[in-house]
Image (tube, grey):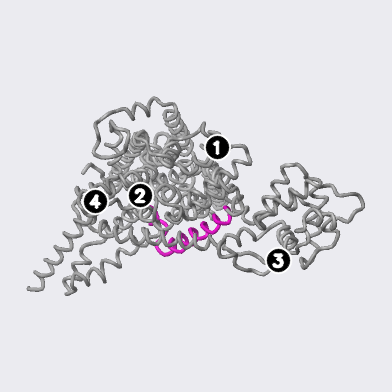
């Protein structure tokens, strides 16, 4: 500093120029460095945006997207927009749908719009097909009379109510359906008929299976982690290996193994019968018991590993200090050890719960029809029923639950802990 | 004194009980996996114990049936391409994240690791929806792109973790001594982060090689992977060939796990000051 000062006092202008040039050089080189680093980041960011974020966003948008009616029945959609939605619409609406159906008669679009309206009103598809076949209507005749002559359903306000509700560019139909709700023709929210209420039960089942699995994993994982943390170096690394083998084994292989083990002729039933514990094979697979056994097996390492890594860091001195102050072992455990392990327990519990909520493969292989969770129905509505809107609505709810848990517990336990290895 | 001896006794009992329990649980964890082993060598047609005799017939079936060899080759091909791409992209990203300081950095990091947190069935259905629109369903490219998206976060995370112990002065020293950026990367940075890059690539390979759900949605029979082939077998009727296939899948995972643990131990040794073997 003093050297600099004495130098600058001798040649003030030069030093100022020098230092400002230096500053410029530094900031230029820093900018160059930043650009270089951003260039290294760019490919991954673009890739993730293009092949993860974009597909996910498009799929999620599908839960409110409603292009069919505006695309395939444009005149009807136009008329419906200005109509009140009450009672029976006027002649213009009948003329519009007659013209729309005439335009798509015999085309694949007719099937697509029929399927779309069928979601909201079973039987709509048949009605549209039947009506389109009789198009066009005679010149100058009343469209209303012609349509009602083809099928009296056209006189029903409920049908027009559905058309009115569903003709917007966006719809809440799928999100409501995924909550077992629907709008009455008058636009009021109501629950669907009891025999059609499947989704609320589905969420209940998904949550109860996930919570049971999480509780079992924590109850089983905690003592195992504790024993591992107390074991000698050699024993601990062997035990860690035994936890890591299933952790690294494909979930599919493990689920398959459980199907083989738990079936009526399987090893578990054979062994129980040979031991005389049971007389006839227990039903252990393709039911809830099988799902719980296999899911706990698959997810247990996710509970053990974070708890173990926290326990490893707990110094024995705390426990000895508490004991030396006269605390009973139970009290030491309850007031010192357990609180210290909580971050690991919370992290393990979060991981297990979040993973199990999204399970699809294991319940599909090991469970019965009554044990399937949200993931199965997302797949079902994508592959078998081809109802993208409903698949997307279910996916949206699942994603919201997962994101909420991650954010809440990530804040509490720290995101770094939510990693197993 | 009396209380001390009684506490040690209860403590010892509790500890003993916990040990027995832990060993039972560890057996529960590994036993099902190893039950598959002997079954794959059965001489019979059914998956039941006791085995009627030993035979390699199911492995012969696995390695000669075009259905299974095709699936194995598909899995290897997709896995290797995915690994190379994800490792290169992910290592670059981790280096960029490590070297740069800017406001959006936490956001970018979150973006790059989110694919791990999203349930894979949602990723699979989204990929199906998107790839159907751009004609990539039923293509190798589509499957590989989806697998890279899934594997990339693992590489970013593992390499970033290695870089945390990396002294940023080392590449500066190299540069000040006149090394080109490429030479610095090749001779200074990469050798130090190599274990992290290797673990990341192992992670990436396993992610792709074991991946089932995306393959179920976006592949046609031509790109069927080993997990997909096993899945269709299990949902119909389990033949012993499936256990042979499962053992092949299992062996690959276990060998890669051993590689991974070795790499982890190595990098931990290197990070320790004056790091020597213990």
A91 sits to left or right of B86: right
Instruction: Report helix, strand or loop for mark 2.
Output: loop
Q: Which label lies toward us, 1 or 2?
A: 1
Report the Cα–Cα distance between label 1 and label 4.
Answer: 47 Å
* Residue at image coords 27%, 50%: B28
Q: Which label lies toward us, 1 or 4?
A: 4
Q: Which part of the image, by quadrant, shows the N terminus of chain A?
A: bottom left
Report the Cα–Cα distance between label 2 and label 4.
Answer: 36 Å
Q: Is A393 inside the magenta-drawn segment? A: yes
Chain of the residue on which disc 1 is drawn: B
Q: Nearer the viewer, residue B265 or A39?
A: B265
Please give the range of residues in magenta.
Answer: A391-419
Chain of the residue on which disc 4 is drawn: A
Q: Residue furthest left?
A: B1
Report the Cα–Cα distance between label 4 and label 3.
Answer: 58 Å
| Numbered badge on residue A421 | 2
> Residue tagged by mark 3?
A185
Q: Looking at the image, do the residues carrying marks 3 and 1 touch, with CB atoms under 8 Å apart?
A: no
Q: Is B153 inside the magenta-drawn segment? A: no
> Residue tagged by mark 4?
A272
Q: Which label lies toward us, 2 or 4?
A: 4
Instruction: Work out whether mark 2 precedes mark 4 in sequence or the reverse, and give the earlier one.
Output: 4
> Residue tagged by mark 1?
B142
């Amino acid at each position: 500093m003093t050297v600099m000062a004495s130098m600058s006092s001798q040649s003030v202008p030069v030093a100022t120029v020098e230092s400002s040039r230096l500053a410029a050089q530094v900031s230029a080189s820093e900018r160059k460095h930043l650009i270089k680093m951003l260039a290294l980041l760019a490919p991954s960011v673009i890739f993730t945006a293009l092949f993860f974020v974009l597909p996910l966003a498009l799929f999620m948008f599908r839960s409110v997207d409603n292009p069919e009616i505006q695309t395939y029945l444009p005149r009807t959609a136009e008329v419906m927009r200005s109509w009140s939605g009450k009672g029976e619409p006027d002649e213009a609406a009948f003329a519009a749908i007659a013209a729309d159906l005439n335009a798509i008669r015999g085309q694949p679009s007719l099937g697509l719009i029929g399927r779309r309206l069928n979601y909201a009103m079973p039987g709509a598809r048949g009605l549209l097909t039947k009506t389109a076949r009789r198009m066009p209507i005679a010149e100058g005749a009343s469209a209303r009379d012609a349509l009602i002559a083809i099928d009296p359903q056209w006189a029903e306000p409920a049908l027009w109510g559905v058309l009115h509700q569903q003709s917007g560019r966006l719809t809440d139909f799928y999100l409501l359906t995924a909550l077992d709700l629907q709008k009455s023709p008058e636009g009021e929210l109501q629950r669907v008929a009891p025999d059609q209420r499947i989704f609320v039960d589905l969420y209940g089942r998904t949550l109860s299976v996930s919570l049971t699995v999480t509780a079992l994993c924590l109850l089983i994982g905690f003592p195992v982690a504790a024993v591992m943390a107390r074991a000698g170096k050699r024993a601990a690394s062997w035990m860690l290996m035994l936890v890591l083998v299933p952790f690294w084994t494909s979930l599919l292989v493990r689920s398959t193994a459980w199907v083989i083990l738990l079936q009526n002729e399987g090893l578990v039933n054979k062994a129980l019968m040979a031991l005389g514990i049971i007389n006839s094979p227990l039903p252990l697979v393709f039911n809830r018991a099988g799902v719980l056994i296999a899911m706990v097996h698959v997810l247990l390492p996710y509970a053990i590993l974070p708890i173990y890594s926290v326990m490893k860091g707990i110094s024995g001195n705390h426990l000895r200090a508490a004991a030396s102050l006269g605390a009973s072992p139970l009290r030491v455990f309850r007031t010192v050890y357990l609180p210290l392990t909580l971050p690991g327990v919370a992290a393990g519990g979060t991981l297990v719960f979040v993973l199990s909520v999204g399970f699809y493969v294991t319940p599909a292989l090991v469970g019965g029809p009554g044990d399937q969770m949200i993931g199965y129905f997302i797949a079902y509505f994508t592959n078998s029923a081809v109802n993208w809107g409903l698949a997307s609505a279910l996916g949206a709810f699942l994603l919201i639950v997962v994101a909420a848990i991650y954010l809440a517990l990530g804040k509490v336990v720290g995101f770094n802990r939510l990693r197993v290895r | 004194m009396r209380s001390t001896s009684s506490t040690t006794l209860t403590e010892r009992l509790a500890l003993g009980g916990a040990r027995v329990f832990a060993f039972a649980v560890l057996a529960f964890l590994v036993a099902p996996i190893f039950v598959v082993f002997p079954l794959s060598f059965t001489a019979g047609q059914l998956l039941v114990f006791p085995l009627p005799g030993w035979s390699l017939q199911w492995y012969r079936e696995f390695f000669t049936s075009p259905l299974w060899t095709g699936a194995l080759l598909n899995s290897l091909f997709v896995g290797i391409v995915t690994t190379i791409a994800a490792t290169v992209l992910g290592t670059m990203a981790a280096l960029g994240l490590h070297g740069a300081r800017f406001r959006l950095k936490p956001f970018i990091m979150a973006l790059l690791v989110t694919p791990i947190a999203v349930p894979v069935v949602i990723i699979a259905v989204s990929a199906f929806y998107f790839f159907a629109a751009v004609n990539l369903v039923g293509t190798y490219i589509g499957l590989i792109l989806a697998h890279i998206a899934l594997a990339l976060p693992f590489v970013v995370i593992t390499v970033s973790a290695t870089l945390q112990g990396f002294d940023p002065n080392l590449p500066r020293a190299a540069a000040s001594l006149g090394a080109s950026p490429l030479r610095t990367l090749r001779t200074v940075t990469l050798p130090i982060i190599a274990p992290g890059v290797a673990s990341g690539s192992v992670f990436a390979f396993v992610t792709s090689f074991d991946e089932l759900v995306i393959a179920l949605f976006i592949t046609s029979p031509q790109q069927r992977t080993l997990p997909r082939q096993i899945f269709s077998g299990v949902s119909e009727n389990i033949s012993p060939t499936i256990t042979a296939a499962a053992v092949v899948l299992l062996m690959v995972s276990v060998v890669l796990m051993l590689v991974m643990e070795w790499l982890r131990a190595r990098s931990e040794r290197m990070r320790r000051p004056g790091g020597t073997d213990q």
